[in-house]
Image (tube, rainbow, N blue to C red):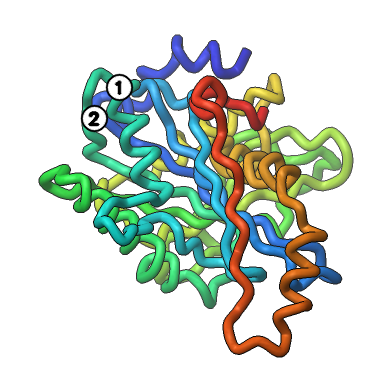
Amino acid sequence: MNSKLALEHRQMIPVVTQIPTLILGMDVSHGSPGRADIPSIAAVVGSRCWPLISRYRASVRTQSPKVEMIDSLFKPLDDGKDDGIMRELLLDFYQTSQQRKPKQIIIFRDGVSESQFSQVLNVELNQIIKAYQSMGQGDLPKFTVIIAQKNHHTKLFQADSPENVPPGTVVDSGIVHPRQYDFYMCAHAGPIGTSRPTHYHVLLDEIGFSADNLQKLVLSLSYVYQRSTTAISVVAPICYAHLAAAQMGQFMKFEEFADTSSGSVNSSSPPSIPELPRLHADVCSSMFFC
């Protein structure tokens, strides 16, 4: 229902709907604490069928265990071709958006700490730029990079009231960083307990969003999650990336990899990371992770 309603209300975000915009959600899933030898799974979802903001395609790759930075966004092969995640998502955006190239790319990244913020720009954003350039796309699009954090201890409440703050509450002063661009948003309604907002850090904003427009976009993306009829606590692209990583992880034969890695302890070369099976053409363009 939420994704259907997005068709009717997309005019509310002109910065995104009037200019071809690709929205990305990125997350990395790691093995359980007791299984440090299990490969990590990197998942990126990209919006499609512009100007909709509720349709997404996922691309998933494996990488070295416990590595948080995604290293397969741009993956040049020996023959010079790119087999990375971004090429797949850029082509899909072009094919489903009236042969339009994205002029703006908005990146929502989950699962990184403040000490890794610079790596998101220097490692991951740099790969995205290289992937775009390798396709001969011409001028680079404008980028906005946003980190979403849920693991914090900040909670919001109403003074002189036992109720939670209303859905859509934003705090962008007082308790935020004095120089950096960040804000707290409680997009969801918490029926039990005290609602915990999501802490959004804007690392880069070449698009030039006003504070109100950016917060409106974040709130709108909290309403397009297909598994819920109401807003969720974080933007839907991040949830979709998390689901895609978990879903594709079911295809991994972790036991075989653990045996291989343990058998190569005395070897000078590191164990190879098994690749995930590629999805069937009828499935890869669907939201199979929902």
Tell me if residue 46 can be seen: yes
Instruction: Check disc 1 and report the residue beneath it.
Output: 97
> As rendered, which of 108 and 233 lies closer to the eye?
108
Residue 146 location (% of width, % of height): 45, 54
Q: Position of residue 101 (x, y in %)?
A: 22, 33
> Residue at image x 34%, y 21%?
96
- Tell me the amino acid under the disc marked 2: Ile
Q: Secondary structure at mark 1?
A: loop
Of the pair 41 and 190, the residue shown nearer to us: 41
Q: Say if 271 sits above or below 169 in the image.
A: below
- The residue sitting at 71% across, 24% down in the picture is 228
In whole angstroms, how far apart are the C-alphas of marks 2 and 1? 11 Å
* Position of the N terminus by quadrant: top right
| Total number of numbered discs in the rendering | 2
Query: Which residue does the numbered mark 2 point to in the structure image?
Result: 19
Amino acid identity at mark 1:
Ser
Mark 1 residue crowding within 10 angstroms, few (<14) / some (14–19) / many (20+) = some
Q: Quadrant of the C terminus?
A: top right
Q: Earlier in the sequence, mark 2 or mark 1?
A: 2
In the rendered image, is residue 158 in sight? no
Q: Residue at x 30, y 22 (%)?
A: 97
